[in-house]
């Protein structure tokens, strides 16, 4: 692993990186559960049984630590949500579906504990200045852009109607996901219903290239997707 | 004003209440802008040029202060969003519209500064235990219930289709609002587009009791609503 410029006076780069990883993991756990504002060097030092000065050696400031936490959270989000949609052989409406499906997976599997780290952090810090709000905003932007791009691509291959406004539709899909997440957090319902909401929305965008029956149920939809790969 | 049991040893109830109001106002400003976790007795005392012990006399604990802040935020939300929809003469689909319209107003007018206090707080603390997360959850629940009840009522007067699942539709409308708010915070777009998204959704729910033309534009919609009151 590359020596990180924030490691300060740590002399063994390998060991320093490892400790740093552990610190970020623990810090992310706190931040995802209680928000970035709850993350203090003091609480973290106690959890890790380290001295505050030891922590400062690794990060130099609370802001650097927060930046590392947001970066790690972003990496997890990208690898679990955005990357699967870029898999070979996925195209058109299936790619849009894969993004939404994995977004829900990410939440269901509790990859990040707590409510929904990015949504909470985004809404709370959207109007604040500084490196951290910008980083959080950037992750949200990349997510919306990915949705928009796959919608554009789905239009190009004729899966969805040409008249559809991709940006607007990305926003609506994101809204539906936030709405079902909200309801999930409140009522602890399962996400099957959530996927049906997304499927109905996709059905309203689709051209007659895709048989109407494919949108009748999740089972029918999964069967249709299998057929696309045969 | 009634003497509050949290006022402790403050001897003049009137003055105590007034000071308490000022404290809560300032605390809400901090919490709405930076989240409840950012609210510390120390920061607040500095802002208000009061002593920490003076603040403790009024609230006893940080948790009591947070509870008062969430309560005040809830009151603002109810008076600006839920109450207008209960006005005499409003019924059916117009009541559903009024709720969504005022939700957007609440955000546009910056009644609470920052991103969107309840959404941020809700997502961040939905999986936490305690009085504050429960209070935040309760406000979100009351909002969703209000949406659901007006949808039920709209169905009863024949404005929307009988087959519509009110709970599911309330969740979808809330999701659309969160989605447009997200986009607004990111791109600083105006909310006219947001209202069009809501109007299109309402159009998809409406029976033929309502002329299709009413959903063609916001202008047409407002004209149609005027006609309902003539």
Image: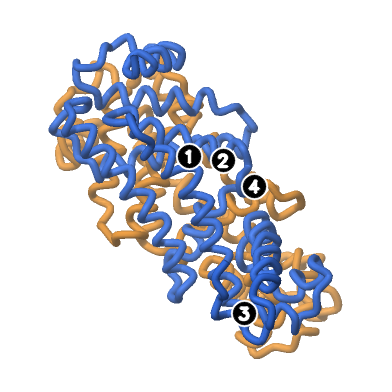
Chain colours: A blue, B orange
Chain hosting mark 1: A
Q: Which-is-in-front pick, marks 3 and 1?
A: 3
Counting from the top left corner in percent of width and height, residue B144 is at: 52, 37
Q: Nearer the viewer, residue B180 or B12?
A: B180
Q: Which mark is residue A7?
A: 3
Chain hosting mark 2: A
Looking at this rendering, what residue extends furthest in the right direction?
Answer: B9
> In the figure, is residue A87 to the left or right of B3?
left
Find disc 2 in the rendering and name its residue: A107
Counting from the top left corner in percent of width and height, residue A148 is at: 28, 44
Q: Which-is-in-front pick, marks 3 and 4?
A: 3
Quarter of the image with the C terminus of chain B is top left
- Could you tell me how far apart the alpha carbons at marks 2 and 3 are, in whole angstroms? 32 Å
Find disc 4 in the rendering and name its residue: B126
Q: Which-is-in-front pick, marks 4 and 1?
A: 1
Quarter of the image with the N terminus of chain B is bottom right
């Amino acid at each position: 692993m590359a020596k990180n410029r924030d490691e300060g006076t740590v002399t063994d780069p390998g060991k320093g990186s490892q400790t740093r990883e552990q610190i970020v993991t623990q810090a992310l756990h706190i931040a995802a559960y209680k928000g970035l504002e709850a993350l203090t060097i003091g609480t973290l030092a106690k959890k890790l049984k380290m001295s505050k000065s030891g922590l400062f050696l690794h990060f130099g400031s609370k802001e650097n630590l927060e930046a590392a936490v947001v970066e790690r959270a972003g990496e997890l989000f990208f690898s679990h949500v955005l990357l699967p949609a870029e898999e070979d052989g996925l195209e058109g409406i299936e790619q849009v579906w894969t993004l939404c499906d994995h977004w829900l997976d990410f939440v269901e599997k509790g990859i990040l504990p707590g409510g929904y780290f990015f949504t909470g952090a985004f809404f709370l810090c959207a109007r604040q200045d500084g490196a951290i709000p910008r980083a959080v905003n950037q992750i949200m932007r990349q997510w919306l852009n990915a949705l928009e791009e796959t919608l554009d691509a789905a239009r190009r291959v004729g899966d969805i109607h040409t008249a559809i406004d991709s940006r607007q539709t990305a926003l609506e899909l994101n809204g539906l996901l936030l709405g079902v997440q909200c309801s999930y957090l409140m009522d602890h319902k399962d996400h099957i219903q959530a996927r049906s909401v997304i499927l109905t929305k996709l059905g309203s965008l689709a051209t007659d290239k895709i048989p109407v029956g494919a949108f009748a149920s999740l089972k029918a939809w999964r069967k249709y997707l299998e057929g696309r790969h045969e």
